[in-house]
Amino acid sequence: MTQSRDLIVGIDAGTSMIKTVAFARDGGQLGEFALPNSYRIAAGGRVEQEMARTWTDTVAAVRGLASVVPDLGTRLAAIAVTGQGDGTWLIDDDGRPVAPALLWLDSRAAKLVDEIRSSERNAKLYRRTGSGLNACQQGAQLAWFKAHEPDVLSRAGTAFHCKDWLYFLLTGERATDPSEATFTCGKFRKRGFDEETAGLIGISDLMRLFPKVVDGVATTHRLTDAAAAETGLPAGVPVSLGYVDVICNALGAGLYDTAPDIGCTIVGSTGMHMRLAANADAVTLNSEATGYTMPFPVPGHYAQMQSNMAATLNIDWLLDLALDVLAAEGVTRARGDLLKRLDERVLQAEPGELLFHPFISDAGERGPFVAHEACAQFFGLRSRHRYWDLMRAVIEGLAFAARDCYAAMGTLPRDIRITGGAARSRALGTILAATLDCNIRICSRAEAGAAGAAMIAAVATGCYADMAACAEDWVSPHLSTPQAPDPVLAARYAKLFPVYLDARLGSRPVWKQLAALRAGDAHV
């Protein structure tokens, strides 16, 4: 990498935004540009995205970045691309889309997934993939196409994910990365697609659709002349296929560390909790057959993850309740007004007074258990409890849900890095550290996903000898000093967690009865 070409551009095509970020070779962020993504929701659980529009928006985002970073084209050393995971993006032999892309939010395959999960095939499938089957995954969505729209598959030549589609248009290569190949329809121990796994899902005849697996840490392809003309970037620049966005987020936020027992929690609208396994034998599978196991962009390493369908959505819900009451009395406020003193007020409230299950999502829950009917709920309310007692219980509920997820992946980590929209909350950090009884480090990097993708390109193009050296420059300066848990609070939460768990397990019949009543079923 010459001195004149000293920039790496990371592209992160997420569900809500398409972001382009320019990084210096040492990881410093030099500029960014983002555009909103678009998708449509239709009946039958359909959530789709126009593939051509995604490419057009990505091109616009790249050109937007060039407008804010001087001499981007002449300084560009490499491009890296990541994007939203799961989903199914089908193209024909000529490279044209054959149908709108199915996103990870699409649930049309839910019935099919329920049938497999309740059969003897599920345990075999889980042992191979290390990932719980759910309707958002490409394997299940292909099975749905096979059963309901076989004509679409008859026209298809390749099944991509979002970032794979963009990589194809940038380089002309039909490829996917090891992380998405594994949980889509693969075997985690061999870091790629697997015919027996496809057979268990019922799509062994569709193996022809899966592209080659390319590890972007080791292999790049050149930016084509056609893509260069559209983006305004120089033809021939190396392009690296990043791992799926959640892996890139974890890499950029500090999940990779040579120290043992590292975890990473992303606290956004949803909650993602990840552990690093140094080898396949260190992967812990759970009895509920949930979560994901994905190859990590370091030789032999894996990331295990469990996700809560709703994290800060629970906080937003309770804030909005207060705003509704104020609005009814003619007082106009915004969430930001209530957030200004949230940390102070929450930390003044008595700890562990209430229990809250943070299952506020209409989609129920899928980590570390699968229950489409799961509901949010408070336990232990008394007349003395006030609004900020409820808010403290909500944040404690998020922390207990995180502990629940980490427990499904083995022992609790000793050091957890936090990123996401709520990562800077002092109350959240204090409560999470005590609940998990571990050190907490906050990642201050705003665009960890794009950074993780760019780190893969930095190693692939020889800027760094390995990922450990890259992380020392790109990640370590953005991590706060470790925050140790409060021992008194940790002891309190250690006693409460089994109660939280008992309440969760005992509530499943109630959730089912409520769901049946809401659906109008008289036989409950």
Image: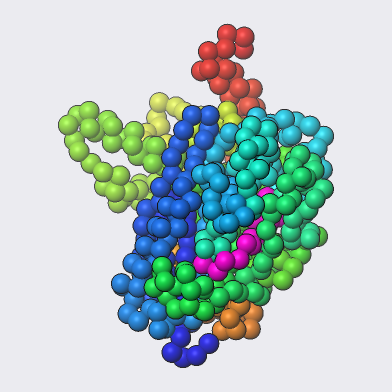
Q: Residue furthest front?
A: 94
Q: Residue furthest left?
A: 330
- In terms of depth relative to the viewer, which is nearer, 516 or 149? 149
- In terms of depth relative to the viewer, which is nearer, 409 or 349? 409
292 in relation to 80, above or below: above
* Left/right of residue 412 with respect to residue 43 in the rendered view: right
Q: Residue at (32%, 48%) from the top-left corner? A: 339
- In terms of depth relative to the viewer, which is nearer, 164 or 186? 164
Q: Which residues are magenta?
A: 170-184
Reply yes or no: does residue 180 show up in magenta.
Answer: yes
In the rendered image, the quadrant that contains the C terminus is top right
Q: Residue at (69%, 54%) from the top-left corner? A: 210
Q: Residue at (60%, 52%) from the top-left corner? A: 92
* Left/right of residue 521 with respect to residue 332 in the rendered view: right
* Left/right of residue 400 with respect to residue 443 in the rendered view: right
* Left/right of residue 70 with respect to residue 331 in the rendered view: right
Q: Residue furthest top?
A: 522
Residue 372's spot in the image, x, y percent?
A: 59, 31
253 in relation to 363, above or below: below
47 in relation to 166, above or below: above
The number of numbered discs placed on residues in the rendered structure image is: 0
Q: Residue at (45%, 73%) from the top-left corner? A: 228
Question: Based on the displayed image, in which of its 4 quarters is residue 177 positioned?
Answer: bottom right
**Magenta stretch prevailing secondary structure:** helix
- In terms of depth relative to the viewer, which is nearer, 321 or 344? 321
Residue 440's spot in the image, x, y percent?
A: 54, 61
Q: Is residue 364 visible?
A: yes
Q: Is residue 405 visible?
A: no
Residue 79's spot in the image, x, y percent?
A: 50, 73
Reply yes or no: does residue 48 show up in magenta.
Answer: no
